Amino acid sequence: MSPSPPPRDSWSLPATVRRELVVLAVALGFGVLAVPPLLWLAGSRGLGPYAGGGMGALVGSFFRGLASASLAFWVVALAPYLITLVVRALVGIARGFPAAD
């Protein structure tokens, strides 16, 4: 008789789920903290000054948009994670699907 595996903590998650949650957290953090200033920088260089003020005004309105559950602001915040999902899907397609036996 083989020894039984150690009991799993009822709150523990599979490694793949934990890894995906880490990817989501990092991408969301980047989307919330880095993307708005990058958008301001690109917009100010390409389109001119932000009409609402400087970078602080844009970041402030971005966080107000997130707080008001505006879909457009959440799409911007989640864009880095969505891009990782698309890249993963494209890599999976490029590698090919496993042959069915």
Image (cartoon, rainbow, N blue to C red):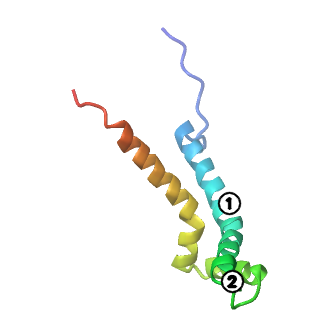
Against 62, residue 23 (above or below) is: above
Answer left or right for 81 relative to 63: left
Which kind of residue does numbered mark 2 sit on?
A: Ser
Q: Which amino acid type is shown beneath numbered disc 1?
A: Gly
Q: Which residue is mark 2?
A: 61
Q: Position of residue 97 (x, y in %)?
A: 31, 37
Where's residue 22, x and y in %? Answer: 63, 48
| Quadrant containing the C terminus in the rendered view | top left
Number of residues whose C-alpha sits closer than 10 Å to that of mark 2, classed few (under 14), some (14–19) or many (20 or more): some
- Going by the image, does 71 lie left or right of 51? left
Mark 1 lies on residue: 29
C-alpha separation, residue under disc 1 versus residue under disc 2: 17 Å
Viewer-nearest residue: 55 or 29: 55
Choose between 62 and 5: the one closer to the eye.
62
Where, by quadrant of the figure, is residue 25 drawn?
bottom right
Counting residues from the N terminus, which is met first, the one under dot 1 or under dot 2?
1
Residue at 68% in and 77% down: 45
Residue at (55, 47) in percent of width and height: 20
Please name the residue shown 71% across and 86% down the image: 49
Within 10 Å of the Cα at label 1, are there few (<14), some (14-19), or many (20+) other Cα atoms? some
Residue 82 numbered tag: none
Residue extending farthest left? 101
Image quadrant where residue 74 sits: bottom right
* Position in image of residue 33 (x %, y %): 71, 66
In this orientation, which residue lies closer to the viewer: 14 or 61? Answer: 61
Residue at 58 percent across and 76 percent down: it is 73
